[in-house]
Each structure stands twice: as structure tokens, then as C-alpha cells.
Amino acid sequence: MKPRFATLALAAVFLAIGSAPGAGPVRAQPTIAISNYGEYRTQRSGESLREPRTAAGSITFLSGVRLVNRTTVVFGQIGRDFGVEIDLQGFGEDPVRLTIRTVHPPLTNPETGRTTRISEYRQEVEDRRNVYFGYTFSYLWELAEGEWVKQFLYRGRVLAEQRFRVVVPMY
């Protein structure tokens, strides 16, 4: 008889919680999934925007994104693009404001003299599938060997990350 009473009491608690004022349907937490990663080929699709919280001081919008090698080991050379494609789930239909962060070995920009270990910027994202974010080695001073981590934050929380190992070949 006791187990039946315990089950009824537990059911009554769940009913009371579910019918409490302000209680509504439970919503799934938004998530970000890595759908692809590695070395890419891209094309510039517009001007660069000034972004002082990045190592180079700007971000560039890209198009024609195509994965050429799914890998976590990237050979550092000028013009090489590597990055991540993400899928956003549970965010609704409105644009999503993400923080895109790249944690990298120390990089010193010779124009500013500033050394950074974290480059980040905010981006409004409208698409939900295969959204590309990457890094292009544009300057010799960006070729830093070591671990590089691409992180995707929403409301201050890291929802996804992808690690890369950058290797700089000796010439």
C-alpha cells in the first residue's frame, strides 16, 4: 500500500507544479552543433569590417565556402583558410547574436604592437545550417604553431567548440 500512496503523492506534486501560475511548456535549450570543420577554400564577398577585438583588427565576409580537407591539423601558410560550419538548433526564427571566439597562441600585430591570445567578435546569424566561420592566414605574423580553438558563445556560454593544431612548415 505504501508504494501506491507514494506514486499518487508524486503525481499530485507534478500536477501542482505543472499548473502553477506562469508555468508554460518546457522549451529545449538552444544548441549549436559542429557540422563540418577543416581546411576550406573561400572568396571575399565585400569589404573588411574593423573589429578591434581580433588579432588583425578586422573581419572579412566570405562566400563560395567549400571544404577541401576535413582535418584538425592545419598547415600554416599565407592564404590558408580553416574553420568550422555550424548548425543552430532551438533558437527560433529571429536572428541569433553569437560571439565568435578564436583562442590561439600569442599573436603580435606589428602595426599596433598589441599581442593577443583571444580574437573575438559578435555576429548576427540568420541561417541555421552550415554557417561557416573561419580564419585566414593573411600575414606572416599570424602563422603561429600550436592549438587554435574556435568557440561559439550564446549569452556568454560556450555552446560549441572545435580544436585545431596549426603546424608551420620549415622552408
Image (spheres, helix red, strand yellow):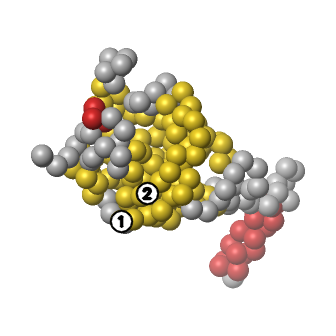
Instruction: Name the residue type under label 1.
Output: Asn
Furthest-left residue in this view? 171
Instruction: Name the residue type under label 2.
Output: Arg
The residue identified by callout 1 is: 69
Q: Nearer the viewer, residue 29 or 170?
A: 170
User: Is 39 positioned to the left or the right of 5 in the image?
Assistant: left
Q: Residue at x 12, y 46 (%)?
A: 170
The residue identified by callout 2 is: 41
Quadrant of the frame with the N terminus: bottom right
| Residue 20 pos. (x, y %) | 84, 54
Instruction: Say which element carries label 2.
Output: strand
| Residue 130 pos. (x, y %) | 57, 62
| Residue 67 pos. (x, y %) | 44, 64
Instruction: Say which element carries label 1.
Output: strand
Q: Residue at x 70, y 75 (%)?
A: 7
User: Is 10 positioned to the left or the right of 98 in the image?
Assistant: right
Kindly report which numbered mark, 1 or 2, lies closer to the viewer in this rendering: 2
User: Is 82 positioned to the left or the right of 92 in the image?
Assistant: left
Q: Does the image show residue 63?
A: yes
User: Is 127 positioned to the left or the right of 66 in the image?
Assistant: right
> Dot 2 surroundings within 10 Å: few (below 14), some, or many (20 or more)?
some
Q: Nearer the viewer, residue 19 or 48?
A: 48
Rendered view: 152 above or below 119: below
> Dot 1 surroundings within 10 Å: few (below 14), some, or many (20 or more)?
some
Rendered view: 27 above or below 123: below
Q: Residue at x 49, y 31 (%)?
A: 58
